[in-house]
Amino acid sequence: MAHHLTPSELADQLRMNQQEVIGKCVEMGIPIFHGRIDRTLFETSLRSIATSPGQPSASPARH
C-alpha cells in the first residue's frame, strides 16, 4: 500500500471529503509535497487530535 497519497486518494480511503482532508492538513501542520500527503502522519495526527483531552476550561477549577 502506498504511503504518500493525493488528497483525493486519502479522502477515498478514509471516507472523508477531499476539502476536509486538505483542511485537516492545514490545521494540523501536515505538509503536502508535490500534491501528496503522508498517510501515516495524517492518520497519526488525526488520532492524536481525536484522543487529546478537551479544552483546559473543561477541568474543574480549584481555588
Image (cartoon, rainbow, N blue to C red):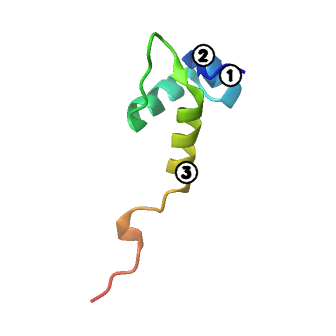
Label 1 packing within 10 angstroms: few (<14), some (14-19), many (20+): few
Q: Amino acid at mark 1?
A: Asp
Which residue has dot 2 on it? 8
- Point out residue 5 in the picture as x, y percentages from the top left corner: 59, 18
Which residue has dot 3 on it? 50
Q: Residue at x 55, y 18 (%)?
A: 7
State which tag comes first along the sequence, 3 or 1: 1
Marks 3/1: CA distance?
20 Å
Residue 57 vertical placement versus 4 (above, below):
below
**Where the N terminus falls, by quadrant?**
top right
Q: Residue at x 51, y 41 (%)?
A: 45
Asked if the residue under mark 1 is in contact with the one under mark 3, i.e. CB atoms within 8 Å, the reply is no
Marks 1/2: CA distance?
6 Å
Q: Amino acid at mark 2?
A: Ser
Q: Amino acid at mark 3?
A: Ala
Marks 3/2: CA distance?
22 Å
Q: Which mark is residue 12?
A: 1
Outermost residue to the top: 34
The quarter of the picture where residue 32 lies is top left
Asked if the residue under mark 2 is in contact with the one under mark 1, i.e. CB atoms within 8 Å, the reply is yes
Asked if the residue under mark 2 is in contact with the one under mark 3, i.e. CB atoms within 8 Å, the reply is no
Residue 50 vertical placement versus 1 (above, below):
below
Q: Nearer the viewer, residue 21 or 44?
A: 44
State which tag comes first along the sequence, 3 or 2: 2
The reply, left or right, for residue 26 in relation to residue 16 is: left
- Point out residue 31 in the picture as x, y percentages from the top left corner: 41, 25
